[in-house]
Image: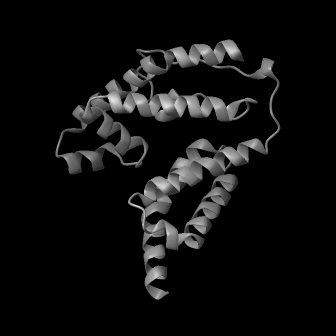
Amino acid sequence: MTENSTQIEATIEKEKGRLYNFIRRNVPNKEDAEDILQDVLYQFASSFESIRLMDRVSSWLMHVAKNRIIDSRRKKKPKAFGDIKISIPNDESDSKLSLEEIIPNLGELPDEEYWKNQFWDAIEDALDEMPDEQREVFEMNEFEDMSFKEISEIKNEPINTLLSRKRYAVLFLRKRLKDLYEELKNNV
């Protein structure tokens, strides 16, 4: 049991900062984000025997966090259709290039689960088609919550090169998601 406890503690210590940042970006309330983090970590600790055999514990934690975020949004009172505004990101915008900008806030839509799945499927497909260098920088920055300085040290490449690759990745994703945005806008 002590070996499991040590592994659980080490994994939690390694993952909790990145996991909290991911949750916090998707939950407007700090207290709710902390509650979701505790739920995810509790589920991890209580399911450790089956999880530790997995190759990608980080992916499992992110998936559970995403589900908890969705569950917390379902508990909120939905808005009327007339109050929902969907904006299509500008393809050439030089504003902050983040995943939050690419995926619309769907938390209040009655069909939110369907649309979230549509966007995530489209993003996964687009990432598979993206050049490896762009995909790696995008995933390290967005999914692993690494700074460009950290990525630069790992890849031994200039930060400006990495920023450029991330920008191209975001522009590629925006272009690929444009039709889905239009479909969403027409259905709201």
Is residue 106 in view from this perspective? no
Residue 21 or residue 112, whichever sits in front: 112
Q: Position of residue 153 (x, y in %)?
A: 22, 50
Image quarter where the C terminus lies is top right
The residue at 33%/27% (across/down) is 129
Is residue 31 in view from this perspective? yes
Task: Indicate left or right for 133 with 72 as reference.
Answer: left
Q: Position of residue 157 (x, y in %)?
A: 18, 41
The single residue placed furthest to the bottom in the displayed view is 2
Q: Position of residue 123 (x, y in %)?
A: 46, 31
The single residue placed furthest to the left in the displayed view is 156
Task: Indicate left or right for 33 with 123 as reference.
Answer: right
Residue 179 or residue 144, whichever sits in front: 179
Task: Indicate left or right for 149 with 55 as reference.
Answer: left
Task: Indicate left or right for 160 with 105 as reference.
Answer: left
The residue at 50%/16% (across/down) is 178
> Can you tell which quarter of the image residue 56 is in?
bottom left
The residue at 40%/21% (across/down) is 94
Q: How is the structure coloured here?
A: one colour
Q: Position of residue 71 (x, y in %)?
A: 71, 47
Position of 123 relative to 35 (above/below): above
Total labels: the figure holds: 0
Position of 90 relative to 147 (above/below): above
> Can you tell which quarter of the image residue 108 is in?
top right
